[in-house]
Protein backbone atom coordinates (compact mmCIF):
# COMPACT_ATOMS: atom_id res chain seq x y z
CA UNK A 1 0.00 0.00 0.00
CA UNK A 2 1.26 3.51 -0.81
CA UNK A 3 1.93 5.88 2.11
CA UNK A 4 -0.19 8.94 2.84
CA UNK A 5 0.37 11.20 5.84
CA UNK A 6 -3.25 10.98 6.91
CA UNK A 7 -4.03 9.10 10.11
CA UNK A 8 -7.66 8.50 9.06
CA UNK A 9 -6.95 7.38 5.49
CA UNK A 10 -3.44 5.98 5.68
CA UNK A 11 -3.40 4.65 2.11
CA UNK A 12 -5.13 5.42 -1.20
CA UNK A 13 -7.04 2.16 -0.73
CA UNK A 14 -8.40 3.30 2.62
CA UNK A 15 -9.48 6.61 1.14
CA UNK A 16 -11.21 4.86 -1.76
CA UNK A 17 -12.95 2.52 0.67
CA UNK A 18 -14.20 5.49 2.72
CA UNK A 19 -15.52 7.21 -0.39
CA UNK A 20 -17.23 4.04 -1.58
CA UNK A 21 -18.91 3.31 1.77
CA UNK A 22 -19.94 6.94 2.29
CA UNK A 23 -21.47 7.13 -1.15
CA UNK A 24 -23.40 3.89 -0.57
CA UNK A 25 -24.47 4.99 2.91
CA UNK A 26 -25.81 8.32 1.72
CA UNK A 27 -27.50 6.90 -1.38
CA UNK A 28 -29.00 3.67 0.00
CA UNK A 29 -28.80 3.51 3.80
CA UNK A 30 -29.84 7.03 4.74
CA UNK A 31 -33.24 7.02 2.98
CA UNK A 32 -34.49 3.99 4.94
CA UNK A 33 -32.93 4.77 8.32
CA UNK A 34 -35.79 6.67 9.98
CA UNK A 35 -38.42 4.13 8.89
CA UNK A 36 -36.33 1.13 9.97
CA UNK A 37 -35.89 2.77 13.37
CA UNK A 38 -39.60 3.55 13.68
CA UNK A 39 -40.70 0.07 12.60
CA UNK A 40 -37.90 -1.79 14.45
CA UNK A 41 -37.06 -3.50 11.19
CA UNK A 42 -33.79 -5.10 10.08
CA UNK A 43 -33.43 -4.35 6.38
CA UNK A 44 -32.26 -7.70 5.02
CA UNK A 45 -32.18 -6.81 1.28
CA UNK A 46 -30.03 -3.76 2.06
CA UNK A 47 -27.78 -5.85 4.30
CA UNK A 48 -27.18 -8.33 1.50
CA UNK A 49 -25.92 -5.47 -0.71
CA UNK A 50 -23.02 -5.05 1.74
CA UNK A 51 -21.92 -8.47 0.51
CA UNK A 52 -21.81 -7.24 -3.10
CA UNK A 53 -19.54 -4.40 -1.93
CA UNK A 54 -17.12 -6.79 -0.23
CA UNK A 55 -17.91 -5.35 3.20
CA UNK A 56 -19.39 -8.41 4.94
CA UNK A 57 -16.04 -10.17 4.92
CA UNK A 58 -13.99 -7.00 5.22
CA UNK A 59 -11.21 -8.50 7.38
CA UNK A 60 -11.71 -12.09 6.21
CA UNK A 61 -9.28 -14.02 4.02
CA UNK A 62 -9.73 -13.68 0.27
CA UNK A 63 -9.46 -17.46 -0.11
CA UNK A 64 -12.97 -17.82 1.38
CA UNK A 65 -14.59 -14.79 -0.24
CA UNK A 66 -13.43 -12.03 2.09
CA UNK A 67 -11.67 -8.76 1.26
CA UNK A 68 -8.58 -9.38 3.40
CA UNK A 69 -8.43 -5.80 4.70
CA UNK A 70 -7.05 -4.52 8.01
CA UNK A 71 -8.47 -3.05 11.22
CA UNK A 72 -8.29 0.50 9.84
CA UNK A 73 -10.54 -0.56 6.95
CA UNK A 74 -13.00 -2.12 9.40
CA UNK A 75 -13.04 1.12 11.39
CA UNK A 76 -13.69 3.17 8.24
CA UNK A 77 -16.66 0.99 7.22
CA UNK A 78 -18.27 1.16 10.68
CA UNK A 79 -17.69 4.89 11.02
CA UNK A 80 -19.28 5.67 7.66
CA UNK A 81 -22.31 3.38 8.07
CA UNK A 82 -22.92 4.64 11.58
CA UNK A 83 -22.96 8.27 10.45
CA UNK A 84 -26.26 7.53 8.69
CA UNK A 85 -27.72 4.53 10.53
CA UNK A 86 -26.05 3.17 13.70
CA UNK A 87 -28.69 0.44 14.03
CA UNK A 88 -27.87 -0.92 10.60
CA UNK A 89 -24.16 -0.55 11.41
CA UNK A 90 -24.64 -2.67 14.54
CA UNK A 91 -26.19 -5.50 12.50
CA UNK A 92 -23.20 -5.20 10.17
CA UNK A 93 -20.75 -5.35 13.09
CA UNK A 94 -22.39 -8.45 14.59
CA UNK A 95 -22.06 -10.24 11.27
CA UNK A 96 -18.71 -8.99 9.92
CA UNK A 97 -16.75 -8.79 13.17
CA UNK A 98 -18.45 -11.03 15.73
CA UNK A 99 -19.14 -13.88 13.33
CA UNK A 100 -16.96 -13.62 10.22
CA UNK A 101 -13.75 -12.22 11.67
CA UNK A 102 -13.99 -14.50 14.70
CA UNK A 103 -14.44 -17.67 12.64
CA UNK A 104 -11.84 -16.61 10.09
CA UNK A 105 -9.21 -16.18 12.82
CA UNK A 106 -10.13 -19.17 14.98
CA UNK A 107 -11.78 -21.72 12.71
CA UNK A 108 -10.19 -24.70 10.94
CA UNK A 109 -9.63 -24.79 7.17
CA UNK A 110 -12.72 -27.02 6.87
CA UNK A 111 -14.90 -24.64 8.91
CA UNK A 112 -13.66 -21.59 7.05
CA UNK A 113 -14.41 -23.28 3.71
CA UNK A 114 -17.85 -24.46 4.78
CA UNK A 115 -19.20 -21.34 6.48
CA UNK A 116 -17.37 -18.22 5.38
CA UNK A 117 -18.16 -17.93 1.64
CA UNK A 118 -21.91 -17.78 2.39
CA UNK A 119 -21.37 -15.27 5.18
CA UNK A 120 -19.12 -13.03 3.06
CA UNK A 121 -21.60 -12.96 0.19
CA UNK A 122 -24.57 -12.18 2.44
CA UNK A 123 -26.39 -15.43 1.65
CA UNK A 124 -26.32 -16.17 5.40
CA UNK A 125 -26.75 -13.71 8.28
CA UNK A 126 -24.44 -14.42 11.22
CA UNK A 127 -24.11 -13.47 14.86
CA UNK A 128 -22.31 -14.33 18.07
CA UNK A 129 -23.83 -15.70 21.30
CA UNK A 130 -21.93 -14.88 24.46
CA UNK A 131 -24.37 -13.09 26.80
CA UNK A 132 -27.08 -14.85 28.77
CA UNK A 133 -30.03 -13.65 30.85
CA UNK A 134 -27.97 -14.16 34.02
CA UNK A 135 -24.46 -13.47 32.70
CA UNK A 136 -23.36 -10.36 30.81
CA UNK A 137 -20.40 -8.53 32.34
CA UNK A 138 -19.67 -11.71 34.27
CA UNK A 139 -19.42 -13.60 31.00
CA UNK A 140 -17.49 -16.52 32.46
CA UNK A 141 -20.49 -17.11 34.70
CA UNK A 142 -22.34 -18.45 31.64
CA UNK A 143 -24.61 -21.45 32.25
CA UNK A 144 -25.07 -22.77 28.69
CA UNK A 145 -23.59 -26.25 28.75
CA UNK A 146 -22.21 -28.67 26.18
CA UNK A 147 -22.50 -32.41 26.74
CA UNK A 148 -20.84 -35.07 24.59
CA UNK A 149 -23.18 -37.57 22.91
CA UNK A 150 -21.34 -39.97 20.62
CA UNK A 151 -19.85 -37.92 17.79
CA UNK A 152 -22.03 -34.92 18.60
CA UNK A 153 -22.40 -32.29 21.28
CA UNK A 154 -25.70 -31.37 22.94
CA UNK A 155 -26.02 -27.67 23.88
CA UNK A 156 -28.49 -26.58 26.53
CA UNK A 157 -29.17 -23.05 27.71
CA UNK A 158 -30.35 -19.58 26.68
CA UNK A 159 -28.49 -16.74 25.04
CA UNK A 160 -29.73 -13.18 25.42
CA UNK A 161 -29.36 -9.88 23.53
CA UNK A 162 -28.12 -11.58 20.37
CA UNK A 163 -27.78 -9.14 17.49
CA UNK A 164 -28.99 -10.75 14.23
CA UNK A 165 -30.57 -13.50 16.36
CA UNK A 166 -33.72 -12.93 14.32
CA UNK A 167 -34.09 -11.62 10.79
CA UNK A 168 -37.79 -10.79 11.24
CA UNK A 169 -40.31 -10.86 14.09
CA UNK A 170 -40.52 -14.64 14.06
CA UNK A 171 -37.62 -15.95 12.00
CA UNK A 172 -34.30 -17.07 13.41
CA UNK A 173 -31.02 -15.73 11.99
CA UNK A 174 -28.94 -18.15 9.95
CA UNK A 175 -25.66 -19.00 11.66
CA UNK A 176 -23.99 -18.30 15.00
CA UNK A 177 -20.85 -18.75 17.01
CA UNK A 178 -22.06 -19.99 20.39
CA UNK A 179 -19.97 -20.08 23.55
CA UNK A 180 -20.79 -22.85 26.04
CA UNK A 181 -19.13 -24.62 28.94
CA UNK A 182 -18.22 -28.28 28.30
CA UNK A 183 -19.42 -30.65 31.00
CA UNK A 184 -17.07 -30.67 33.99
CA UNK A 185 -15.22 -27.56 32.76
CA UNK A 186 -14.13 -24.93 35.28
CA UNK A 187 -14.89 -21.20 35.01
CA UNK A 188 -12.23 -20.53 32.40
CA UNK A 189 -13.08 -23.55 30.23
CA UNK A 190 -15.33 -22.46 27.39
CA UNK A 191 -15.88 -24.00 23.95
CA UNK A 192 -17.14 -22.35 20.80
CA UNK A 193 -19.54 -24.02 18.35
CA UNK A 194 -20.92 -23.12 14.94
CA UNK A 195 -24.70 -23.49 15.23
CA UNK A 196 -27.00 -23.18 12.23
CA UNK A 197 -30.69 -22.59 11.81
CA UNK A 198 -32.37 -25.97 11.40
CA UNK A 199 -30.22 -27.88 13.87
CA UNK A 200 -32.52 -29.93 16.12
CA UNK A 201 -33.17 -28.22 19.47
CA UNK A 202 -32.23 -24.71 18.31
CA UNK A 203 -34.95 -22.07 18.22
CA UNK A 204 -35.80 -18.40 18.49
CA UNK A 205 -36.96 -17.62 22.04
CA UNK A 206 -38.16 -14.12 21.23
CA UNK A 207 -37.27 -11.07 19.23
CA UNK A 208 -36.80 -8.28 21.78
CA UNK A 209 -39.04 -5.27 21.17
CA UNK A 210 -39.20 -1.66 22.34
CA UNK A 211 -35.47 -1.03 22.45
CA UNK A 212 -34.38 2.54 23.18
CA UNK A 213 -32.13 2.65 20.12
CA UNK A 214 -30.30 0.64 17.44
CA UNK A 215 -33.79 -0.42 16.42
CA UNK A 216 -32.74 -1.12 12.82
CA UNK A 217 -30.89 -4.16 14.12
CA UNK A 218 -32.76 -7.08 15.59
CA UNK A 219 -31.93 -8.36 19.07
CA UNK A 220 -33.13 -11.76 20.20
CA UNK A 221 -33.18 -14.40 22.87
CA UNK A 222 -32.09 -17.78 21.50
CA UNK A 223 -32.86 -21.15 23.07
CA UNK A 224 -30.79 -24.34 22.94
CA UNK A 225 -32.66 -27.40 24.11
CA UNK A 226 -30.33 -30.37 23.75
CA UNK A 227 -29.33 -28.76 20.46
CA UNK A 228 -27.37 -31.37 18.51
CA UNK A 229 -24.13 -30.02 17.01
CA UNK A 230 -21.63 -32.23 15.15
CA UNK A 231 -18.05 -32.36 16.47
CA UNK A 232 -16.72 -30.87 13.26
CA UNK A 233 -18.47 -27.62 14.30
CA UNK A 234 -16.37 -27.24 17.46
CA UNK A 235 -14.07 -24.27 16.82
CA UNK A 236 -10.52 -24.70 18.09
CA UNK A 237 -9.57 -27.38 20.58
CA UNK A 238 -12.62 -27.73 22.84
CA UNK A 239 -12.34 -25.66 26.01
CA UNK A 240 -9.90 -23.04 24.72
CA UNK A 241 -12.44 -20.54 23.41
CA UNK A 242 -11.74 -17.88 26.03
CA UNK A 243 -8.75 -16.95 23.89
CA UNK A 244 -10.98 -16.58 20.81
CA UNK A 245 -13.39 -14.47 22.81
CA UNK A 246 -10.71 -12.11 24.15
CA UNK A 247 -8.99 -11.69 20.78
CA UNK A 248 -12.21 -10.91 18.97
CA UNK A 249 -13.40 -8.54 21.68
CA UNK A 250 -10.53 -6.21 20.81
CA UNK A 251 -11.77 -5.67 17.26
CA UNK A 252 -15.37 -5.61 18.48
CA UNK A 253 -14.64 -2.76 20.89
CA UNK A 254 -12.60 -0.88 18.33
CA UNK A 255 -15.39 -1.04 15.74
CA UNK A 256 -18.01 -0.09 18.34
CA UNK A 257 -15.82 2.95 19.05
CA UNK A 258 -15.78 3.60 15.29
CA UNK A 259 -19.57 3.62 15.36
CA UNK A 260 -19.33 6.36 18.00
CA UNK A 261 -17.20 8.41 15.62
CA UNK A 262 -19.87 8.26 12.92
CA UNK A 263 -22.56 9.36 15.38
CA UNK A 264 -20.44 12.26 16.60
CA UNK A 265 -19.47 13.46 13.14
CA UNK A 266 -23.04 13.51 11.92
CA UNK A 267 -24.21 15.28 15.08
CA UNK A 268 -21.56 17.98 14.65
CA UNK A 269 -22.51 18.47 11.00
CA UNK A 270 -26.16 18.88 11.91
CA UNK A 271 -25.59 21.33 14.77
CA UNK A 272 -22.99 23.34 12.86
CA UNK A 273 -25.28 23.80 9.86
CA UNK A 274 -28.24 24.68 12.07
CA UNK A 275 -26.17 27.27 13.93
CA UNK A 276 -25.62 29.01 10.58
CA UNK A 277 -29.21 28.88 9.44
CA UNK A 278 -31.19 29.60 12.61
CA UNK A 279 -31.52 33.22 13.65
CA UNK A 280 -32.21 34.38 17.19
CA UNK A 281 -32.24 37.98 18.38
CA UNK A 282 -31.27 38.96 14.84
CA UNK A 283 -28.10 36.84 14.71
CA UNK A 284 -27.21 33.30 13.67
CA UNK A 285 -27.00 30.94 16.64
CA UNK A 286 -23.26 30.51 16.14
CA UNK A 287 -22.75 34.11 17.30
CA UNK A 288 -23.69 33.09 20.85
CA UNK A 289 -20.93 31.94 23.19
CA UNK A 290 -22.93 29.14 24.75
CA UNK A 291 -23.66 27.67 21.30
CA UNK A 292 -19.99 28.06 20.36
CA UNK A 293 -19.09 26.00 23.40
CA UNK A 294 -21.39 23.16 22.28
CA UNK A 295 -19.92 23.14 18.78
CA UNK A 296 -16.29 23.65 19.67
CA UNK A 297 -16.13 21.14 22.52
CA UNK A 298 -17.92 18.57 20.37
CA UNK A 299 -15.48 19.05 17.52
CA UNK A 300 -12.41 18.80 19.75
CA UNK A 301 -13.72 15.70 21.57
CA UNK A 302 -14.62 14.01 18.27
CA UNK A 303 -11.15 14.67 16.88
CA UNK A 304 -9.52 13.41 20.10
CA UNK A 305 -11.59 10.20 19.94
CA UNK A 306 -11.00 9.82 16.24
CA UNK A 307 -7.24 10.17 16.63
CA UNK A 308 -7.22 7.60 19.44
CA UNK A 309 -9.33 5.10 17.45
CA UNK A 310 -7.22 5.34 14.28
CA UNK A 311 -3.99 5.20 16.22
CA UNK A 312 -5.12 1.97 17.90
CA UNK A 313 -6.54 0.56 14.64
CA UNK A 314 -3.25 1.19 12.84
CA UNK A 315 -1.39 -0.81 15.47
CA UNK A 316 -3.90 -3.67 15.79
CA UNK A 317 -2.68 -7.00 14.48
CA UNK A 318 -5.81 -9.00 13.69
CA UNK A 319 -3.96 -12.26 14.14
CA UNK A 320 -2.96 -11.78 17.76
CA UNK A 321 -4.21 -10.22 20.98
CA UNK A 322 -2.54 -7.73 23.28
CA UNK A 323 -4.30 -4.43 22.67
CA UNK A 324 -6.77 -4.82 25.49
CA UNK A 325 -6.02 -1.60 27.38
CA UNK A 326 -6.60 0.53 24.33
CA UNK A 327 -9.49 -1.42 22.83
CA UNK A 328 -11.23 -0.88 26.17
CA UNK A 329 -9.91 2.69 26.19
CA UNK A 330 -11.25 3.77 22.80
CA UNK A 331 -14.70 2.43 23.58
CA UNK A 332 -14.75 3.90 27.08
CA UNK A 333 -13.90 7.33 25.73
CA UNK A 334 -15.80 7.34 22.44
CA UNK A 335 -19.13 5.88 23.59
CA UNK A 336 -19.75 8.67 26.08
CA UNK A 337 -18.21 11.23 23.73
CA UNK A 338 -20.76 10.30 21.04
CA UNK A 339 -23.67 10.41 23.47
CA UNK A 340 -22.58 13.83 24.76
CA UNK A 341 -22.06 15.22 21.26
CA UNK A 342 -25.49 14.00 20.11
CA UNK A 343 -26.94 15.50 23.28
CA UNK A 344 -25.36 18.88 22.51
CA UNK A 345 -26.68 18.69 18.96
CA UNK A 346 -30.20 18.25 20.32
CA UNK A 347 -29.62 21.24 22.60
CA UNK A 348 -28.37 23.45 19.77
CA UNK A 349 -31.44 22.59 17.69
CA UNK A 350 -33.86 23.19 20.57
CA UNK A 351 -37.33 21.78 19.80
CA UNK A 352 -36.25 20.72 16.32
CA UNK A 353 -33.57 18.54 17.89
CA UNK A 354 -36.17 16.70 19.92
CA UNK A 355 -38.07 15.35 16.92
CA UNK A 356 -36.99 12.88 14.27
CA UNK A 357 -36.62 15.14 11.24
CA UNK A 358 -33.10 16.30 12.09
CA UNK A 359 -31.84 12.79 12.99
CA UNK A 360 -29.95 13.76 16.16
CA UNK A 361 -32.55 12.35 18.56
CA UNK A 362 -32.12 8.96 16.87
CA UNK A 363 -28.33 9.25 17.05
CA UNK A 364 -28.58 10.09 20.77
CA UNK A 365 -30.73 6.99 21.40
CA UNK A 366 -28.38 4.82 19.35
CA UNK A 367 -25.30 6.21 21.10
CA UNK A 368 -26.51 4.94 24.48
CA UNK A 369 -26.12 1.32 23.36
CA UNK A 370 -22.39 1.89 22.99
CA UNK A 371 -22.10 2.45 26.74
CA UNK A 372 -23.57 -1.06 27.31
CA UNK A 373 -23.03 -3.47 24.40
CA UNK A 374 -19.66 -5.15 23.89
CA UNK A 375 -18.80 -4.29 27.50
CA UNK A 376 -20.29 -1.68 29.79
CA UNK A 377 -18.44 1.49 30.76
CA UNK A 378 -17.87 -0.09 34.17
CA UNK A 379 -16.34 -3.20 32.58
CA UNK A 380 -13.90 -1.03 30.60
CA UNK A 381 -12.98 0.92 33.74
CA UNK A 382 -12.40 -2.33 35.61
CA UNK A 383 -10.31 -3.89 32.80
CA UNK A 384 -8.13 -0.84 32.19
CA UNK A 385 -7.40 -0.33 35.85
CA UNK A 386 -6.55 -4.02 36.27
CA UNK A 387 -4.26 -3.99 33.23
CA UNK A 388 -2.46 -0.90 34.50
CA UNK A 389 -1.67 -2.51 37.84
CA UNK A 390 2.02 -1.96 38.53
CA UNK A 391 2.54 0.07 35.35
CA UNK A 392 4.04 3.16 36.95
CA UNK A 393 5.72 4.57 33.87
CA UNK A 394 3.82 5.03 30.60
CA UNK A 395 5.83 5.11 27.43
C1 LIG B 1 -28.80 -3.96 21.70
C2 LIG B 1 -27.85 -4.97 22.30
C3 LIG B 1 -27.16 -5.82 21.46
C4 LIG B 1 -26.32 -6.81 22.00
N1 LIG B 1 -25.72 -7.73 21.16
C5 LIG B 1 -25.07 -8.80 21.69
C6 LIG B 1 -24.60 -9.87 20.87
O1 LIG B 1 -24.73 -9.83 19.64
N2 LIG B 1 -24.01 -10.94 21.46
C7 LIG B 1 -23.84 -11.02 22.81
O2 LIG B 1 -23.29 -12.01 23.29
N3 LIG B 1 -24.25 -10.02 23.63
C8 LIG B 1 -24.87 -8.91 23.11
N4 LIG B 1 -25.32 -7.90 23.93
C9 LIG B 1 -25.15 -8.03 25.39
C10 LIG B 1 -24.18 -7.02 26.01
O3 LIG B 1 -22.86 -7.35 25.69
C11 LIG B 1 -24.48 -7.02 27.52
O4 LIG B 1 -25.73 -6.37 27.69
C12 LIG B 1 -23.41 -6.34 28.32
O5 LIG B 1 -22.24 -7.09 28.31
C13 LIG B 1 -23.86 -6.12 29.77
O6 LIG B 1 -24.37 -7.30 30.34
P1 LIG B 1 -25.78 -7.29 31.10
O7 LIG B 1 -26.77 -6.62 30.21
O8 LIG B 1 -26.06 -8.66 31.55
O9 LIG B 1 -25.58 -6.34 32.35
P2 LIG B 1 -24.90 -6.75 33.76
O10 LIG B 1 -23.61 -7.44 33.53
O11 LIG B 1 -25.91 -7.42 34.59
O12 LIG B 1 -24.60 -5.32 34.35
C14 LIG B 1 -25.60 -4.49 34.93
C15 LIG B 1 -24.88 -3.27 35.52
O13 LIG B 1 -23.99 -3.68 36.55
C16 LIG B 1 -22.67 -3.26 36.25
N5 LIG B 1 -21.72 -4.28 36.72
C17 LIG B 1 -21.77 -5.63 36.53
N6 LIG B 1 -20.69 -6.21 37.08
C18 LIG B 1 -19.95 -5.21 37.62
C19 LIG B 1 -18.71 -5.16 38.31
N7 LIG B 1 -17.97 -6.24 38.57
N8 LIG B 1 -18.25 -3.95 38.71
C20 LIG B 1 -18.96 -2.83 38.46
N9 LIG B 1 -20.13 -2.82 37.81
C21 LIG B 1 -20.62 -3.99 37.40
C22 LIG B 1 -22.63 -3.12 34.73
O14 LIG B 1 -21.59 -2.28 34.31
C23 LIG B 1 -24.01 -2.53 34.49
O15 LIG B 1 -24.01 -1.16 34.76
C24 LIG B 1 -26.12 -6.88 23.40
C25 LIG B 1 -26.78 -5.97 24.24
C26 LIG B 1 -27.64 -5.03 23.71
C27 LIG B 1 -28.38 -4.10 24.65
Image (cartoon, helix red, strand yellow):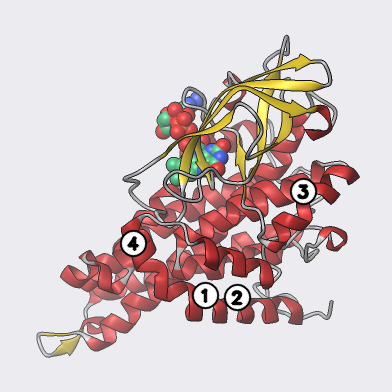
Q: Quadrant of residue 232?
A: top right
Tell me the residue that label 1 is attached to.
25
Instruction: Give the left or right position of residue 246, taking residue 24 as reference.
Output: right
The mark nearer the N terminus, 3 or 2, is: 2
- Circle 2 crowding by C-alpha within 10 Å: few under 14, some 14–19, many from 20: many
Judge by depth and name the residue closer to the eye, 64 or 352: 64
Q: Which mark is residue 21?
A: 2
- Circle 4 crowding by C-alpha within 10 Å: few under 14, some 14–19, many from 20: many
* As drawn, 347 above or below 315: below
Pointers 3 and 4 in contact (CB under 8 A)? no
The mark nearer the N terminus, 4 or 2, is: 2
Pointers 4 and 1 in contact (CB under 8 A)? no
Q: Which mark is residue 362?
A: 4
Residue at 67% in and 16% down: 187
The mark nearer the N terminus, 3 or 1, is: 1
Q: CA distance from mark 4 to mark 2?
A: 21 Å
Tell me the residue that label 3 is attached to.
115
Q: CA distance from mark 3 to mark 1?
A: 27 Å
Of all residues, the one furthest to the top in this rendering is 184
Amino acid sequence: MSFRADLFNPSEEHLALRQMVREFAEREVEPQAAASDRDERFNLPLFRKLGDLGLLGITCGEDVGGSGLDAVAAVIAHEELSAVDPGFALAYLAHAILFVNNLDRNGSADQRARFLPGACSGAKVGGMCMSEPGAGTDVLGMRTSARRDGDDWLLTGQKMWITNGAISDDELGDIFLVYARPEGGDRGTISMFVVEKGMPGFRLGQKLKDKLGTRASSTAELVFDDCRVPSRNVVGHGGDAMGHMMRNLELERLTLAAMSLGIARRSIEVMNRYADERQSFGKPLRAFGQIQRHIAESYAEWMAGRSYVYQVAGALDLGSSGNRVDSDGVKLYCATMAKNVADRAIQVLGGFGYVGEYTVERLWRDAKLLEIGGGTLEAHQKNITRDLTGVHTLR
